[in-house]
Amino acid sequence: MNKILVFGLARTGISALKTLKLKGYELGAIDDNIDDEKLNILKELDVKIESIDSIENYDLILKSPGIRLDNPVIKKANELNIEVVSDLELAQRVFDDIKIIAITGTNGKTTTTSLMTKMLNDSGRKAISIGNIGVGMLWEIYNSDKDTYFVIECSSFQLESTNHFKPMYSCIINITPDHIDWHGSMANYVNAKKKILVNQDENCCAVLNKEDEYYEECRKSTNANVYDVSTVNEVEKGSYVKNGDIYFKNSVEEKIINLKDVKLIGNHNYENILFCVTIAKLIGIENSDIRNTLSSFSGVEHRLEFVREVNGVKYYNDSKGTNVDASVKAIKSFDNNLVIIAGGYDKKVELDEFFIAGKGKFKSIILMGQTRELFREKALEYGFEKVILVDNMKQAVDEAKKVSESGDTVLLSPASASWGMYNNFEERGDEFKNLVNKL
């Protein structure tokens, strides 16, 4: 593995090039859109720009997560038996003995990753969040020391292109339909998620959601020491909620904290917390430090983020609700009188659960983006009559202001990706917040 071709020059690719250059690898780069900024970086690092016709000169290809597996470059690499990997895989090959806590799931990854990192840092340990959360992985690892815990938010795109990835600790928070357009089927999506487990052995720990539909399938996929979490039942080994308190059990039951003292709200967040409590206890973090973190951590931007109250109407930004299940969890966090803004890029998933969760809660439904007609048809099918179609976020916020009154809640939770209208969910959420703050 002396010659590495980096395919895709966004955050992952640039981070990798800088790191691999300093580690002494011979490098090439390929990208469909090399602008002046990328060109300057390549010149500075003395990296050769390659084409599909020259990939045979390389031992390995590092693929940026979003690049599809049916891309012509990837297909040709497979024909030539050139291994294609993600940064998850490469990081572990390039760096020895790094402390990895790998977190995946359809929803809750960012909150759990951020909370786990804060819990480690609050306890006096060194930890950074990397991976799908938005930080270039290899460069961060290169600039950190051996004592650092790397809490990695792992997407299904990243996990798909792993072969030997073996984290010390792994978590699968939940698995529900998402990215079917990319993976091709639900089975392929589930198999990608399970790759976080398959190389773990008895010296590793895996934390699984006992209430998840794919729990048994995941458990059978690993030789790791498995710990469970549940918000509804006690577990033999792991963390659970009982009578309003969070407990951890590993032969002995320990009460950790009362839910009233936890700053995050919603059952989905309690699940996220249980994963962090379990890993924290396995690492050896004191209960008092766990409690201090849980009583101060208020969540991440764009996930059920309170924006402001205007004339008695509360506005929440849940732009990170990029799939139906994420938005269902957000909807369940509120009682009624919801004016919801939804719609965006079509991921080819069923929408029924969105409207089942909104029964008796939705006052008005405001729809935009590629999926707005699909949402409208399904809304009418479920008996919702107050449906408004808009062309952009400005119109959505204006309509929300018109139809809401004191005591209502306006919730942006699109249940769709942002692509086609925005570069990412952050950009979408920022526009929503800016518009609300101008009301």
Image: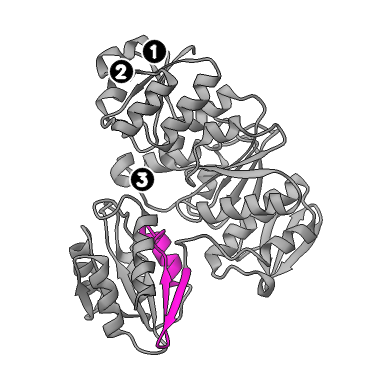
**Residue under the image location 67 percent in, 75 percent down:** 260
Quadrant where the C terminus sits is bottom left
Point out residue 408 in the picture as x, y percentages from the top left corner: 39, 84
Sequence order check, earlier mark of 3 and 1: 1
- Residue drawn where x is 44% and y is 34% of the image: 12
Q: Can residue 234 be seen at all in this image of the molecule?
A: no
Task: Kindly indicate whether the residue at mark 1 contacts the one at mark 2 (C-beta within 8 angstroms).
Answer: yes
Colouring of the image: one colour
Residue name at image x 50 percent, y 15 percent: 25
The residue singled out by tag 3 in the image is 186
Q: Amino acid at mark 2?
A: Glu
157 above or below 113?
above
Name of the residue lying farthest toward the top: 57
Q: Secondary structure at mark 3?
A: helix
Give the vertical position of 190 relative to 108 (above or below).
above
Disc 2 or 3, which lies upstream in sequence? 2
* Foreground of the two, 200 or 161: 161
Residue to which mark 1 is pinned: 58
Query: Is 63 included in the stretch rendered in magenta?
Result: no
| Residues at marks 3 and 1 touching, judged by CB atoms closer than 8 Å | no
Q: Nearer the viewer, residue 237 or 314?
A: 314
317 inside magenta stretch = yes
Residues rendered magenta in the picture: 305-332
Instruction: Tell me the residue that label 2 is attached to.
Output: 50
Tell me if mark 1 has few (under 14), some (14-19) or many (20+) residues whose alpha carbon lies within 10 angstroms of its own. some
Dot 1 amino acid type? Tyr
Q: Which amino acid type corresponds to the residue marked 3 in the rendered image?
A: Met
Mark 2, mark 3: which one is toward the viewer?
2
